[in-house]
Amino acid sequence: MPPPGISSRGASPLARQHSIPTGDQAEQLDMDGKRSLENLVSATGGRGAGGGDKAAAAAQSFYQLMSVLQWWFFNVVVVISNKYIFQIFGFKFPLTLTTIHFIMSALGAYLTIKVFKLKPEIVVQSTRDKVVRIMPVAALTCLNIVLGNVSLRFVPVSFMQTIKCFTPATTLILQRAVWGRKFDSLVYLALIPIVFGVVLTTVAELSFNWTGFLTALAACLTTSTSNIMAEALLQGKYAFDSINTVYYMAPYSTALLILPALFYEGADVSAWAAEQDNIALPLTVILVGGSLAFCLNFSLFYVIQATSAVTFNVAGNLKVALAIIISWMIFRNPMGWLSWVGCLVTIVGCTFYGWVQQKIKAQKAPALAVSEMQEKQPLMGNSK
């Protein structure tokens, strides 16, 4: 069985705190971007002469900019609000917080699809498909989000976000080790600055914590596994967009997580609530954070529709930089100059890695097109 790629449609966006489109995902993003821009051109009057073209181009650029900005907003706010809840409110219960986020996401997806009908439902009628195809991905998604929140509980946002940038490396390692997939030598070279940046950031981290570090690494591994498994189980069967992904994944993730959360953290959560003089504020922030977690998935849908793979790659890396800077301004976690250099090298490395993937994809496209044309030609001697 050939190794699957990474599809933005297969992998749950709940698992994506940082995304770098590769392989089939890049192709899908390019197609989505072109379709959305074509629709936008039609809505603004098509390719009219002179001012019409300029107006359409301006509308396209504005739509792309707004889609990226709103994605940045929701992503950064969700990450920082989680850290704020852990650090400022003392709500140090990642299982419970993740459960609340899944509940809010499930509710938001249900309202979007079933009540307000803002998105058409992609129907999965087969119970076997729900159990065999969707539930394993939901379980990995659940584990990934839990690990990310556990890491955030122990280490600064800047450190956790930088470690999560290691995901391309874990994805490549898994595809090479499990499926024996071979990669272009340039891909391996492109991983060097990512690995170097992560190592430098780890060594220089002034607030280093082994639990936070190891859970962040584990989150990278589960993100890669979830992406690959989603592609293997769902590709060619269900073309989920981000909202339908949440619609199916979040309820399963909630069901898987709610009992462990009650068992391991229930008593401590009750004790924490009893100690609060005014529980309304932290409870409001927790619930709003859960609502924003769903909005993040909605925003991801729009940014994928509006941008090309290259734009999405660059925007994703700038998003990480923005989260690091804003979190440092809020929490003032100690960061030496080597930590800043490590973060910068990692982010630049991720951008370069995405560029390399796009370049390789573009080089292979003509050869694939020729191969497909040759396959469609009748074999000599068979035509009559």
Image (cartoon, helix red, strand yellow):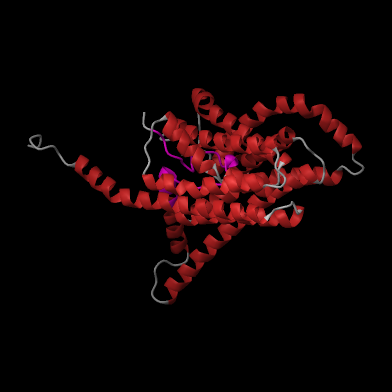
Name the chief secondary structure element in magenta. loop
From the top left corner, tell me how far across and down residue 43 is, in percent.
47, 63
Residue 383, compared with residue 299, is above or below; it is above
From the top left corner, tell me how far across and down residue 307 is, in percent.
49, 56
Q: Quadrant of residue 23?
A: top left
Can residue 57 be seen here? The reply is yes
Q: Residue furthest bottom?
A: 50
How many numbered tags mark residues here?
0
Magenta-colored span: 3-30
Can residue 237 be seen here? The reply is no
From the top left corner, tell me how far across and down residue 31 is, in percent.
41, 51
Q: Is residue 39 left or right of residue 222?
A: left
- Quadrant, the N terminus: top left
Q: Nearer the viewer, residue 222 or 99?
A: 222
Q: Is residue 129 left or right of residue 14?
A: left
- Quadrant, the C terminus: top left
168 within the magenta span: no
Residue 21, compared with residue 50, is above or below; it is above
18 within the magenta span: yes
Which residue: 39% across, 31% down? Answer: 180
Residue 138, compared with residue 58, is above or below; it is above
Q: Nearer the viewer, residue 138 or 52?
A: 138
From the top left corner, tell me how far across and down residue 337 is, in percent.
66, 56
